[in-house]
Image (cartoon, rainbow, N blue to C red):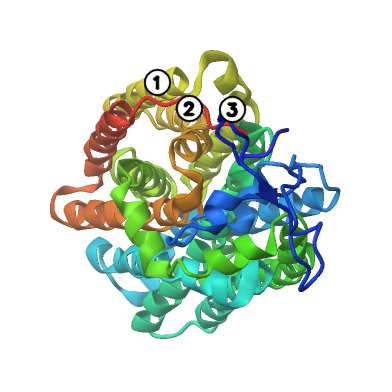
Amino acid sequence: MASSIIYEERETPTPYLSSTKLATGERNTGAIAPASPAIPLATLGSDKPTLFRQEDAVDTLQKWNTPHINMWRVMSCCVVYFGNGINDSATGALIPYMESYYRKGHAIMSLVFVGQALGFVIAAFFNNLILHKIGRAWMLMTAEAVIIVGYIILVCMPSYPAVIVAFFLLGYGAAMTLALNNVFCANLHPPSAVLGAAHGSYGVGGIVAPIVATTMVSAGIVWSRFYLMPLGLACFALAFAGWAFWDYEEHTVETTSEHAETRAEAVTTMQDLERALKNRVTIIGALFVFAYQGAEVAISGWMISFLINYRDGDPASVGYVTAGFWGGITLGRFFLTHLAPILGERLFVVILISGTTGLQLLAWLVPNVITNAVAVSILGLFLGPLYPCAQTVFSRLIPRHVQTTAMGFISSAGSSGGAVAPFTTGLLAQAVGTFVLHPVCIGLYICMLACWFALPKGRKRTE
């Protein structure tokens, strides 16, 4: 694959200076044929700090299995996503039991989603700063350490305010991992398949958690003991991610000029964020992910309560409906994402959103618990590929020099929808009933479709 750095053709070729051709203190006596990597002299003479970043040059050159360490890095990302899926899907299965334990209603219990949302939003403003300060490996390990602290709090069965704090930590840690792993996977070839596998692992976690959680609480085990499982997984993910990405920056230096690295430091984190927010794809992408995550987590969090309240479902049985929903998401991400390059991501996403809306109406209007369960499972199948396909399109439309910051903001700020929508649903459910889940989700699908049509038309990024 060719380098992402494109040199403009001119009548007189621009001389290049290669850092690999000169020793320290050696004088350049003439134009040198461009080596890989090379920096245009026009860039070196510019008064403005370069926007070129190490990670930008490396990612476009690499495939999921080249170099070999990338296979382990992708596996590490999958483990992290698997853990995030466990965390997000378990809440819906455990909420009825947490409400009983703390004697709280739907509205108060929804505050756990608010705590998680605050973690996502706050992380969006600090991810890039932390990355530049401590590097990718240490940032991933720090994120898992924050998640571990959150799980320890939950296992100890604290007072309810401490539970909200724990979910804040879980959201903050998950946002840190998303900001790094989404960009890393989106820039490996083939991006749709790699992101599909990574987010498919998230779906696998979504399948496992409701089954395990429902089985445990149905057997009389207190709800908090479930979190011992993701706690152990987070400890493993910390070690695995640290090992896989330990020398990531060293590989970057080998393929990037030292001078470009030095000049890149002149661009501050706030300047990065300002440039990213000026790009409308960043804002539209964040709104799209906000609506997507809102619908996904709202269904996962409140569908069981809807089936209990309006379909007379048995709590010990309908808890598994969430597993069917996440099973659909997983299958969609592993298999349907391969249709995206064939049909085109833009058309494919429109088809998926339309199908999802129809299935949501079916789950709402047909008064049969079995039909509802099947509809929700197929709904997950259509909903699953939306996120990786959208991330692929966003990464193509966003300029390389702000991609890390922009994609991190899209993931972190956008993912706050996974708290706002469930919280809003909980407030409305307290007032009028849990059936409001369905109109809320349909409104979010309409928002997603509007954002999708608002994206600018652009060619695929040159790689």
Is 342 situated above or below 458?
A: above
Mark carried by residue 382 = 2
Q: Nearer the viewer, mark 3 or mark 1?
A: 3
Q: Which residue is mark 3?
A: 337
Q: From where the camera sits, is residue 223 visible? A: yes
The local secondary structure at tag 1 comes to helix
Residue ID for mark 1: 355
**Mark 3 is on which residue type?**
Thr
Q: Residue 296 in the image: x percent, y percent? A: 41, 44
Whether residue 293 is situated above or below residue 84 in the rendered picture: above
Cβ atoms under marks 1 and 2 closer than 8 Å: yes
Q: Amino acid at mark 2?
A: Phe
User: In the figure, is residue 43 to the left or right of 187?
Assistant: left
- Circle 3 — which element? helix
Examine the image and state in which quarter residue 180 appears. Answer: bottom right
Q: Which of the two marks, 3 or 2, is nearer to us in this view?
A: 3
Residue farthest right in this picture: 68
Q: Is residue 205 visible?
A: no
Circle 2 packing at 10 Å, graded few (<14), some (14-19), many (20+), is: many
- Of callouts 1 and 2, the N-terminal one: 1
313 is higher (above) or lower (below) than 345 = below
Neighbourhood count class around disc 1 (C-alpha, 10 Å): few under 14, some 14–19, many 20 upward: some
Q: Residue at x 63, y 35 (%)?
A: 13
Residue at 86 percent across and 48 percent down: it is: 68
Q: Residue at x 44, y 46 (%)?
A: 314
The C terminus - image quarter: top right
